[in-house]
Amino acid sequence: MTKRRRRVVIKGSSLPVLRIVVRDGDASALRKEVADTIENGRPMLAEAIAVLDLRERQAREVGAREIVDAVRDTGVRVAAVLIGDASERDLLTGLDLPVIEAQSPQQATEQPAEPDLAPAYLTRPLRSGQRFYAQGRDVVVAAPTSRGSELIADGSIYAFSSLRGRVLAGASGNASACIVASHLDAELVAVAGVYRIFEADDLKALGSGPVSVGLSLEADGSERLTLASLAPSPYMQRR
Amino acid sequence: MTRVVVVTSGKGGVGKTTTSASFASGLAMRGKKTAVVDFDIGLRNLDLILGCERRVVYDFVNVIQGDAKLSQALVRDKRNENLAILAASQTKDKDALKEEGVKAVFDELREMGFDYIVCDSPAGIEGGALMALRFADEALVVTNPEVSAVRDADRMLGIIDSKSLRAEQGLEPVKEHLVITRYVPKRANKGEMLGHADVQELLNIPILGVIPESEVVLECSNQGTPVILADGSPAARAYDDMVARFLGEERPLRFINGDASPSLWKRLFGG
Ligand SMILES: Nc1ncnc2c1ncn2[C@@H]1O[C@H](COP(=O)(O)OP(=O)(O)OP(=O)(O)O)[C@@H](O)[C@H]1O
Ligand SMILES: [Mg+2]
């Protein structure tokens, strides 16, 4: 007798899930900022599922319920709400959304070390419509990626080639991940979920040479994506 | 050993059929026994471009469905006995192209001793286009110096890398060549079109040929003559170079500089 093929299987997934982090602020300003931020992120949010992260609010001037409403008003598909404090759970009862209580990343103790996997090695060009995911590791890229492609790593991305599609490092939250590329002409760049979308000419200022991308911590505790050219300055070149 | 070469693009109307006809004729002129197969079911026009439409009795689908023998359906080119054409069917039954059927026809062509099977792919990234690239050993990816055509070519390259039999079986990947057609050097130099180097940089595969935009192409297709036979015209010479390179000859790119002589201004003032 042949073995019956199992009809129900549980598997891991690498679906893009974005975290919308909302911090403190007064009600009307916050509502507008939610709308603006989401409008800017639209191309990325269009296909993604979003999780609303309310854990970084300390003052809680605006209720959790109001924020959920504001985000939903923008049309984004919210899959769950993350809260840091059980007392907020009551405010969210009656929502048809899972409410997950989890420690905020700031309180969290040492992140578990990334497993010691050798980096993935990408040697064929990544074409429009293709995706490459280096799960739980870095990736070394030795062939160009095209517009419309998606290069994702849980670790860092080191490219000895041009990166042109979407490029996402630290995809599962590693804020110390970085992207280094010998030429960057990407449509979107992200590190640990902090992302920027680029129009055709946005990256021109960085020149055609090597570029590095990483997260830097601002004075107010927020994270910012920093892009820097690694090319020698014109002065050096002249010598 | 028979080599299967697909001529493909993603985007429609970029010059696949024009290129297939000249490429197959060029191979035949160089003594290679070549069969050129039209995969554009329902929109057949390769036979028109090659000027043999009147002699098509049976087509590719007839052979696959067992209504005719391959030998009955192959039309021998009247200019070159090394070249045979297998026409597409005019009926719109696109589903007739089943993988086993195509494989059986190709196996028979191999047994008949053909050196090359050239597959003229339809536009798009489904059905007939997938079937045309399925058995490919090499691919001529045809594009125009224009952003949307290049994007589609890129997409097609990704599909070759994942959907070809070679990819699926983990064999050596399909050898990919870039063919840029309808190139107007003057406009590329002015930045109105992508330059051939830009296209190559975006797609990152070696350039096999750059075919200039030419009125001769339309005249040839009206007469049913492959462009490569239009003696002396730049498009014909560019196609001839392309075939020579494919067979391993080294030839520099021609017809990419527009007006090669320096401008009067430069000559006077040393620009
Ligand atoms: N080098 C050229 N100069 C001028 N016209 C050209 C050139 N190459 C192709 N053309 C014209 O472009 C049109 C499309 O060419 P062709 O039929 O070869 O493209 P195709 O990619 O096979 O199209 P389809 O996707 O419909 O099969 C034709 O009218 C042809 O005459
Ligand atoms: Mg065609």
Image (tube, coloured by chain):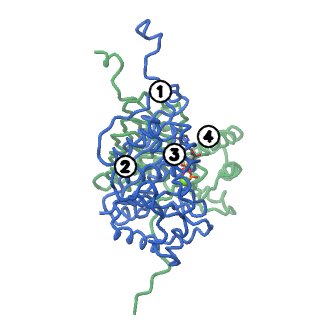
Q: How many marks?
A: 4
Measuring from the top left, give residue B144's x and y in whole percent: 51, 41
Q: Mark 1 and 2 residues: CB-CB less than 8 Å, in contact?
A: no
Measuring from the top left, give residue B217's x and y in whole percent: 54, 42
Q: What residue type is labelled 3?
A: Arg
Label 2 C-beta lies within 8 Å of the nearest ligand 1 atom: no
Cα separation, mark 1 vs mark 2, equals 48 Å
User: What residue is disc 1 on?
Assistant: B258
Q: Is residue B105 above or below residue A141?
A: below
User: What residue is disc 2 on?
Assistant: A155
Q: Which amino acid does label 1 sit on?
A: Gly
Q: How crowded is mark 3: few (under 14 residues within 10 Å), some or many (20 or more)?
A: many
Cα separation, mark 1 vs mark 3, equals 25 Å
Cα separation, mark 3 vs mark 4, equals 25 Å
Depth check, front residue: A79 or B246: B246
Which color is chain B depicted in? Answer: blue
Chain letter, green: A
Label number found at residue B151: 3
Q: In this view, does B257 lie above or below B147?
A: above
Of helix, strand and loop, which one carries label 3?
Answer: helix
Residue sitting at the far front: B78
Of helix, strand and loop, which one carries label 2?
Answer: loop
Q: What residue type is labelled 2?
A: Gly
Q: Mark 3 and 2 residues: CB-CB less than 8 Å, in contact?
A: no
Of helix, strand and loop, which one carries label 1?
Answer: loop
Question: What is the chain identity of the residue bearing mark 3?
Answer: B
Q: Nearer the viewer, mark 3 or mark 4?
A: 3
Cα separation, mark 2 vs mark 4, equals 26 Å
User: What residue is disc 4 on?
Assistant: A40
Q: Which of marks 1 and 3 is in front?
A: 1
Residue at 38%, 54% (x, y): give it.
B28
